[in-house]
Image (cartoon, rainbow, N blue to C red):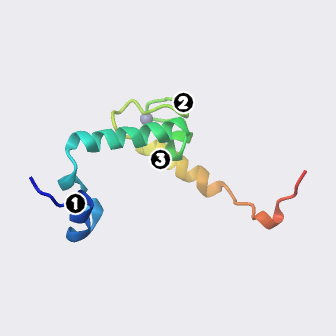
Amino acid sequence: MTTIPPLAILRRKGGAGSRISAVLPHSALDAMLDAAYETNRRFRHGAFAEPCPTCHVSPGELCLARRSVHAARRLAHRARVAQTSVTPLTEAVPR
Ligand SMILES: [Zn+2]
């Protein structure tokens, strides 16, 4: 067993994304992924704000594919974001 803390290993070996699987067990990675998907689903972030054209789930629900978001759902989200214009704060009018 090593006495080096996991974060020190990440810093020493370079990119965190490439080495995180070497530090964390698969069960921890699965739990992290599940938590991230659940958080995005709950607050309807990203693609979870759209209904899925592939598996026909409503916004705020997980796709029926386990641990995946269908590509059509991601594309629908990107298309909606591209159509949305941002209102600058200087143009906001208080009511
Ligand atoms: Zn889907």
The residue labelled by disc 3 is 74
Residue located at (55% from left, 39% from top):
43
Q: Quadrant of ligand 1?
A: top left
Q: Earlier in the sequence, mark 3 or mark 1?
A: 1
Local secondary structure at mark 3: helix
Q: Earlier in the sequence, mark 2 or mark 3?
A: 2
Residue located at (60% from left, 53% from top):
81
The mark found on residue 51 in the picture is: none
- Can residue 75 be spotted in the picture? yes
Q: Nearer the viewer, residue 4 or 64?
A: 4
- Relative placement, left or right, of 6 versus 42 is left
- Relative placement, left or right, of 87 versus 95 is left
Q: Is mark 2 within 8 Å of ligand 1?
A: no
Q: How far apart are labels 2 and 1 at the CA level?
A: 35 Å
The mark found on residue 19 in the picture is: 1
The residue labelled by disc 2 is 58
Q: How far apart are labels 3 and 1 at the CA level?
A: 27 Å
Where residue 73 appears, x then y in whole percent?
48, 42
Q: Which is more foreground, mark 2 or mark 1? A: 1
Specify few, some or many for label 1: CA neighbours under 10 Å numbering under 14, 14-19, or 20 or more: some
